């Protein structure tokens, strides 16, 4: 009899497996159509020879190394190792790994429990005996019962809701990895941009102090000529005004410099006191090599993490549509229990103590179609919104790269003009001072030429800063830099060790978790 029951249970399980093999309901995700750009406008413009951009090869991974600046390389390395925002993204990757394990577990019996109990009961002695036809049986008022057993319940994945859940969890894990990569691209770009800004401010301070020294010499000259009665007090006052206007630039530049260092310290996850040791008190704006490889537009969709993240977000939501649609159909549930029961504990493990239960059921929310269908519609609308978001992300990516390219190319042109302007302004300032000293020119010539020199030098620094900053924007727009995390964990070793000490993570903290660890 028990063998026949076992065969029936096995037959039921086989039928369940056959049902569960059905194709899941809901849409299968396909990458949405997106605009296609065949070639970069700036790279193929008539001024390509002067732009410094080429599509002959793919962009470099560690693009910051093209600046040949050891300090920048060290800053990027520290930011990658210590940035706290990046660690938040890394923790979400580990969370998604665990959530994928939960989704895998839903493919198997969802409720599994082992239980045991021992009961001792006392019934009132005032209850009468049990009457029998032939005799009166006294009532046993004190007895014990014991049992041990295993219970399980399994909602069959006939319509693919659990399988869609696994798809959603897989896509979400890949999405969190893409978000981590996007955070890493943003981090490397922001560190480089702040570093360029810091060097520009340091150069601006050096130029301001150089001009203060030059203008101080001119002011001393006007005072000497005024004391000797050669010129009027007007020259003295004009030179004093120019000198103090230039001196006033220093506090503002120093304030901007410290604020930029503070921002960089946050990105590095470091204290402010370390910035001086890392950066020094002076430096030059880093400049990259002449030719910059930007690859071809078709590579952009594979390289930019935010584009991949937008696609994966749509894929995750596509699975949610299938999960919602599964609620439209009946749910098939298998339940079973097997165990041992006996009065008292001595006979619990004897052969006659075996007990079991097997049941199959169907649940169908037939009176909730309005709510279920509207949930399907809501999930589908969210899916459509993410499709549009993916397409918009692709367009934005193309736009950001093209904008950075044209800004980089035009800033390079500006540098050439401002370099000539600075050379001419410096010569003019020297000539004006010489002529003023010889009495053949008025102080207004010195005033004009020194003002022009300071302005030209400031413009040159700004243009050189724009060249480097826009090049950083080009590389950031191309999605370079995230590849450095390949074959690396998403959190520092010290953090992983702390998590492993605090919680049993199994092998989920490893670079490539095994399939067994996901169940």
Image (cartoon, grey):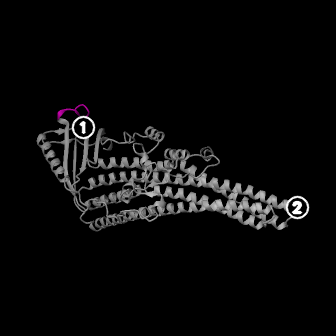
Quadrant where the C terminus is found in the figure:
top left
* Residue 497: x %, y % from top left: 45, 38
Given residues 244 and 490, the one toward you in this image is 244
Residue 244 drawn at (x, y percent): 75, 61
Q: Is residue 117 magenta?
A: no
> Judging from the image, what secondary structure is the residue with disc 1 in?
loop
Percent coordinates x, y for residue 229 in the rendering = 88, 64
Q: Position of residue 15 (x, y in %)?
A: 15, 50
- Point out the tag, 2 or 1, that comes first from the N-terminus: 1
Image point (20%, 54%), residue name? 361
For label 2, count other residues whose C-alpha is less than 10 Å away and answer few (under 14), some (14-19) or many (20+).
few
Magenta stretch, residue numbers: 339-351
Asked if residue 78 lies left or right of residue 32, the reply is right
Classify mark 2: helix, strand or loop.
Answer: helix
Cβ–Cβ under 8 Å for marks 2 and 1: no
Q: Nearer the viewer, mark 2 or mark 1?
A: 2
Res. 229 visible in picture: yes
Q: Nearer the viewer, residue 372 or 112?
A: 372
* Label 2, label 1: how far apart the Cα atoms are: 130 Å
On the rendered structure, is 450 left or right of 501? right
Residue bearing the label numbered 1: 140
Q: Nearer the viewer, residue 208 or 306?
A: 208
Q: Is residue 155 above or below residue 340?
A: below
Rendered position, 126 above or below 239: above
Q: Main secondary structure of the magenta part?
A: loop
Q: Is residue 254 visible?
A: no
The local crowd at label 1, few if under 14, some if 14 to 19, many if 20 or more residues have their Cα within 10 Å, is few
Residue pictured at 76% horizontal, 67% vertical = 444
Residue with the most extreme top position: 346
Q: Quadrant of the N terminus?
A: top left
Checking the image for residue 227, the label placed there is 2
Q: Is residue 174 rendered to the left or right of residue 261?
A: left
């Amino acid at each position: 009899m028990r063998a026949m029951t076992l065969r029936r249970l096995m037959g039921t399980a086989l039928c369940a497996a056959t049902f569960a093999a059905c194709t899941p309901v809901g849409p299968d995700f396909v990458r949405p159509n997106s605009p296609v750009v065949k070639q970069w406008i700036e790279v193929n413009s008539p001024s390509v020879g002067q732009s410094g951009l080429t599509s002959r090869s793919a962009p470099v991974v560690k693009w910051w190394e093209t600046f040949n600046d050891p300090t920048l390389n060290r800053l990027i390395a520290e930011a990658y190792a210590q940035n706290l925002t990046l660690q938040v993204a890394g923790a979400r990757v580990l969370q998604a790994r665990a959530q994928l394990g939960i989704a895998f577990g839903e493919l198997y019996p969802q409720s599994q429990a082992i239980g045991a109990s021992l009961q001792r009961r006392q019934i009132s002695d005032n209850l009468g005996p049990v009457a029998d036809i032939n005799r009166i049986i006294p009532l046993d008022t004190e007895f014990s019962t014991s049992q041990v057993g295993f219970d399980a319940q399994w909602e069959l994945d006939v319509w693919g809701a659990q399988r869609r859940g696994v798809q959603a969890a897989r896509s979400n894990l890949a999405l969190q990895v893409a978000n981590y990569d996007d955070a890493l691209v943003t981090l490397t770009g922001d560190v480089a941009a702040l570093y360029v800004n810091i060097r520009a401010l340091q150069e601006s301070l050096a130029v301001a102090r150089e001009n203060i020294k030059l203008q101080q010499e001119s002011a001393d000259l006007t005072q000497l000529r005024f004391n000797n009665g050669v010129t009027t007090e007007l020259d003295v006052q004009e030179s004093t005004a120019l000198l103090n206007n230039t001196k006033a630039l220093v506090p503002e530049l120093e304030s901007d410099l410290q604020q930029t260092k503070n921002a960089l310290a946050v990105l590095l996850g470091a204290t402010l006191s370390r910035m001086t040791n890392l950066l020094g008190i002076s430096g030059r704006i880093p400049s990259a090599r002449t030719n910059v490889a930007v690859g071809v537009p078709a590579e952009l969709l594979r390289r930019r993490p935010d584009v991949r993240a937008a696609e994966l977000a749509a894929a995750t939501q596509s699975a949610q549509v299938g999960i919602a649609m599964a609620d439209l159909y009946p749910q098939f549930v298998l339940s079973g229990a097997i165990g041992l029961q006996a009065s008292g504990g001595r006979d619990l493990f004897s052969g006659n103590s075996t007990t079991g239960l097997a049941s199959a059921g169907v649940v169908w929310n037939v009176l909730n179609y309005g709510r279920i269908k509207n949930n399907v519609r809501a999930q589908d609308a969210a899916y459509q919104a993410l499709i549009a978001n993916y397409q918009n992300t692709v367009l934005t990516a193309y736009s950001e790269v093209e904008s950075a390219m044209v800004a980089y190319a035009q800033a390079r042109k500006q540098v050439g003009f401002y370099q000539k302007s600075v050379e001419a302004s410096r010569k003019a300032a020297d000539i004006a001072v010489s002529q003023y000293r010889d009495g053949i020119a008025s102080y207004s010539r010195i005033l004009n030429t020194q003002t022009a020199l300071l302005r030209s030098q400031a413009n040159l620094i700004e243009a050189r800063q724009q060249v480097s900053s826009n090049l950083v924007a080009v590389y950031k727009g191309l999605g370079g830099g995230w590849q450095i995390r390949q074959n690396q964990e998403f959190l520092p070793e010290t953090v992983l060790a702390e998590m492993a000490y605090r919680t049993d993570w199994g092998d989920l903290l490893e670079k490539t978790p095994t399939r067994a660890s996901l169940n």
